[in-house]
Amino acid sequence: MQAQQQRIAAIQRAVPTAVAVFVPGGGGGGSGVLISKDGYALTNFHVSSPAGAYMRCGLSDGNVYDAVIVGIDPVGDLAMIRLLGRDDFPVAELADSDLLQPGEECFVVGNPFLLASNLQPTVTWGIISGVRRYQYPAGTLLEYANCIQTDASINPGNSGGPIYNAEGNLIGIVGRAGFEKRGRVNVGVGFAISINQAKNFLGYLRSGRILDHATLGATVVTGPDGGAAVSNILESSDAFRRGLRYGDEILELAGQPILTANDFKNVLGTLPKDWRVPLVYRHEGETIDTIVRLPGVHLEDELLEKMAGALPPPPPSPDAEKDPHGGEKKLPESIQENYNARKGYANYHPNLQYQKDLHAALRKAFPTVSNKQGWLITGQTPSGRAIELVIEDDLQRLTLGKTETDEPQILQLDKPSQWYESIENRSPTAILTVLQSLKRMVQVGPAEYGDTYYMGTLPFLGRLPLVDALVGTRGEVESRFLMDKNRLLGIEGIAGRDRDPAELLFLWPAGDNAAKLPEELELKFGTETDIRIKIQSWTTQASIESN
């Protein structure tokens, strides 16, 4: 009786966070789960895709809400939607799915066969049947890596819904099930995307983008005595630049032990494109501990093309259907206010807000600069040599002061083409290129900087916690502004995908006073430091003419 009461209490706690998803016009539906008080919820890509920009979502309290698409991950079969109309939605508590063990009790809440027409979801109870399962993708989409297997009944309509542990905490997003060939009836083999994988993608999903997963740029096979040995590797990959070679044994990836090729696929399949993660491998008997950048599985246009062909086309959207009384139906007003269409995005609207917020934080942290003004930064190197940086629109100059053994040294950039070359050639003048990108972002903002977007959250220098990434491209140089709690931690200047970017790290004084300037700047290429500067002053001055 005590166990039964605990089970009922856990279900009562969890059910209010489950979402019944319906495609307007009767085009299908599924399930979802709320993860924030302001209405953000997770579901499957294959649930949200037929709905297009918006859907109708019901909760167990009997209320129905308009919901807008936010971001989608077609490779990992995840989508984020946002229920509108409240800022106090019930929220599921996220567990640590890496701690799950077979035999633990769990339960699924959802909308199988769209039975929740009265908005009361179905609950099924079972156990964790297996962990760290790998389900092959359809081509390169709908890959289930490191997923959870359960015997709790999962049927069509449960897709996208929550699976909870016995305490009622969210451990995954239901996605696949094994069905009989006739009747599509559950046979006790269901799979869920782990909530830890979803956590990796939350920042990316909130960006409104269409997301890709990561690759190492290398393939592995399980050796005759176990272990994951590199069977092929791209020389253009960051892993190759960090020393990984054919035949090397991968020991850990992203902090997870790798014992077989299956382990490798399971871990890699849970990571987003463009993340940097720790890699430990054995090369010629030596254990190497490094950090690698992970490229994407697809090119952008390739991903969009595959995504478009992965599922049947959605039914005509309401804004394209003819109204019986003439004219055209439009998206509901609540959706129009929260949705912007743009290529490469599920919804560009949230991305614009993140761009605005991060730009405001940059403007607050650094000296204001306007037209015909530049920055003058003074400091000294670790050896005590004076250094001066002039950062203007048309001129960037680095001056190293005279020492007892060396004459003053002046390096400068006065052409946009030199920005690319400074990074490509691993020149100290790359610090000027990166600082010029910061000056321009502070000065004109995302709308005028160039091609700008909010990427989402990713590890800084390959380590947690995750930080925000604002990306701007001007000319041939892409700049990534990496920020934590509205403070700039670093900028990556990227001139080519097959080369190390120029990384400028910002070391701030202790405390939360955002008005203070950074204490030090450090320019790095790969694992090597090129310049380190202790800042003495950072001021705005009238522009000077180029010599």
Image (cartoon, helix red, strand yellow):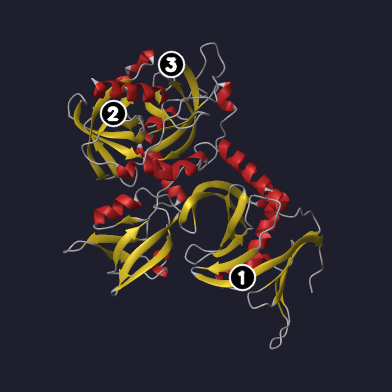
**Residues under labels 3 and 2: Cα distance?**
20 Å
- Secondary structure at badge 1 equals strand
Give, as a three-letter code, the residue at label 3. Answer: Asp
Instruction: Residue 377: name its quadrant.
Output: bottom right
509 displayed left or right of 32 = right
- Secondary structure at badge 2 equals strand
Q: Is residue 256 above or below residue 349?
A: below
- Secondary structure at badge 3 equals loop
Whether residue 304 can be seen here? no
Q: Are marks 3 and 2 in contact (CB under 8 Å)?
A: no
Marking on residue 107: 2
Identity of the residue drawn at 44% across and 22% down: 57
Q: Are marks 1 and 2 in contact (CB under 8 Å)?
A: no
Q: Which residue is mark 1?
A: 532
Q: Position of residue 538 (x, y in %)?
A: 74, 62
Marking on residue 302: none
Q: Which residue is mark 3?
A: 61
Give, as a three-letter code, the residue at label 1. Answer: Arg
Identity of the residue drawn at 51% across and 39% down: 206
Whether residue 540 can be seen here? yes
Q: Residues within 10 Å of mark 3 (few under 14, many from 20)?
A: few
473 displayed left or right of 52 = right
